[in-house]
Image (cartoon, helix red, strand yellow):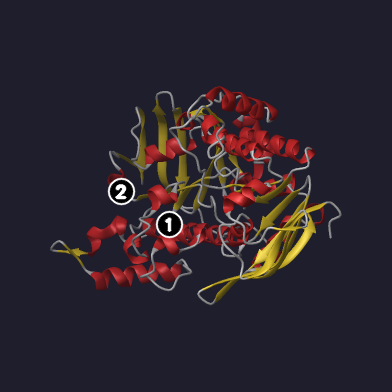
Amino acid sequence: MFQNRILTLNNISKSFSGTKVLDGVTLEIEKGKVHTLMGENGAGKSTLMKILVGLLQADEGEVLLENENISGLSVHDILEKGIAMIHQEILMVPGLSVAQNIFLGKESRRFSWLNESEINAKSKEILASLKVDISPKIKIKNLSIADRQMVEIAKAISNNAKVIIMDEPTSALSDTEVKTLFEIIENLKSQGVAIIYISHKMDEIFKISDTITVLRDGKLIATNKASDLDNNTLISLMVGREISEIFPEAKTEVGKTLISVKNLSKKGVFSEINFEVKAGEVLGLAGLVGAGRSEVARAIAGLDKFDSGTIELDGSEIQINSPSDAIKLGIGFVSEDRKALGFIPQMNIRENFSLSSLLGFSKMGFVDIASETKSTQAIFEDLKVKAIGLGQKVNSLSGGNQQKVVIGKVLMSNPKVIILDEPTRGIDVGAKFEIYKLINTLKTKGLAIILISSEMPEILGLSDRILVLSKGKQMAILPKSEASQEKIMQYAVH
């Protein structure tokens, strides 16, 4: 297919316990191009990439790098051949320096001592080629997520990588950092490096991709030039059905004011925040990373203290000294970090659902399992969680279904107000659509919703009004009819 082909995955198949997760997938990658791999969670993307880098062996098929069959080689051998992967969860040794991490496993030694000056000099040269200003001597633990991402890329380049796989590389980056990453990718392309790019962010993949391949249920659905696709066509290919509206409209009656925040301030973080949210309304919180959106949400949810200001619920001032206070009062919070703060991975769905409302199922210090099961089963069915049943461990679920469990746990406490901080981070487009429908359902039930999202289409598509923050300050509250990406950004960068 491609004249400038560097890599071919030919007719790759893989099964686990009799279940076929890849079924005859063929992929061709071109030098100096970005080839994006799209598909819902469970489509087979990760398995295919693990086969490519030697972490798994295919049951059938072969991998050719520059027409050399590299099937069956070890991870180390494939790295030596020139295929590197930058994982979504950054894999580094925090206590080592930038240079030591870049050259980990291939250290230059002289008289049995690690030649620090040599690896520092080489690292500085590599980082400079990426136009990244990071000292090779600084320890990884002292770097931001964005800078660690750049060091991962530098490590790949140090291996003279011909093909670099980037798995959700922008998931924790600000808009400015994403721009820098894209500039680095363009630089790598100009050097003939092939990029395999995996992302759930629809807006960014059209900015960066030359070619897009869609996988669904382990099968290759289509490979097209990015310029030949649009959002709706790509979504239809991924989920196997037409989605006429990415953000479905919810016809709701807006009711009384449920929550009112007045002059909320925390020194050095945010100041003079004022807003109200009515029943059946979504207030979007927009702004760049570091604007104070999550910090405001955490203060309202009782996770962080604030210095001054008041919070009113149903017209009465409330005191929130802890998350349990917020839950009892009727404020639910879904954290942006679901794995750290949203659920307990080793516990099953039923146990996670009832975490915030266990007292309601307790009799004489013991949990009434029958009552707990009845209530959690209702939530399980209402949210359409895709699982074997309530007994399935949450860490075995897809990202989208894990997020449903987190939201279900919050709903079990019957909140009046629910705060959703990055509710679709790291989940695929089909699961996102399910979350969007759920948000609309919550609106129709009369909840007041505060939505935080770094994805501008989400904020514009789901919010009734949008509060824009910049450096901890409230810049504007825009009604949906007046809001646009340009207008929001004008206030956000102020």
Residue type highlighted by circle 1: Ile
**Residue ID at (52%, 32%):** 100
Q: Nearer the viewer, residue 439 or 478?
A: 439
Q: Quadrant of residue 177?
A: top right
The foreground one among 449 and 403 is: 403
Image-based side of 209 in relation to 324, left or right: right
* Residue at horizontal 50 percent and vertical 28 percent from the top: 114
Determine crowd level at label 1: few under 14, some 14-19, many 20+ residues with C-alpha closer than 10 A.
many
Q: Which residue is mark 1?
A: 407
Q: Which comes sooner in the sequence, label 2 or label 1?
A: 2
Q: How many marks?
A: 2
Q: Secondary structure at mark 2?
A: helix
Left or right: 147 with respect to 139? Answer: right
Which numbered tag is attached to residue 329?
Answer: 2
- Spot occupied by residue 179 in the image (x, y as percentages of width and height): 67, 35
Report whether 97 appears left or right of 202.
Answer: left
Residue 410 can be seen in this image? yes
Q: Quadrant of the C terminus?
A: top right
Furthest toward the front, the residue is: 111
For residue 388, which quarter of the picture?
bottom left
What mark, if any, has residue 339 been given in the picture?
none
What's the CA distance linking mark 2 and mark 1? 17 Å
Residue appearing at x 28%, y 45% in the figure: 325
Pinpoint residue 78: horizontal percent, then vertical percent.
63, 51
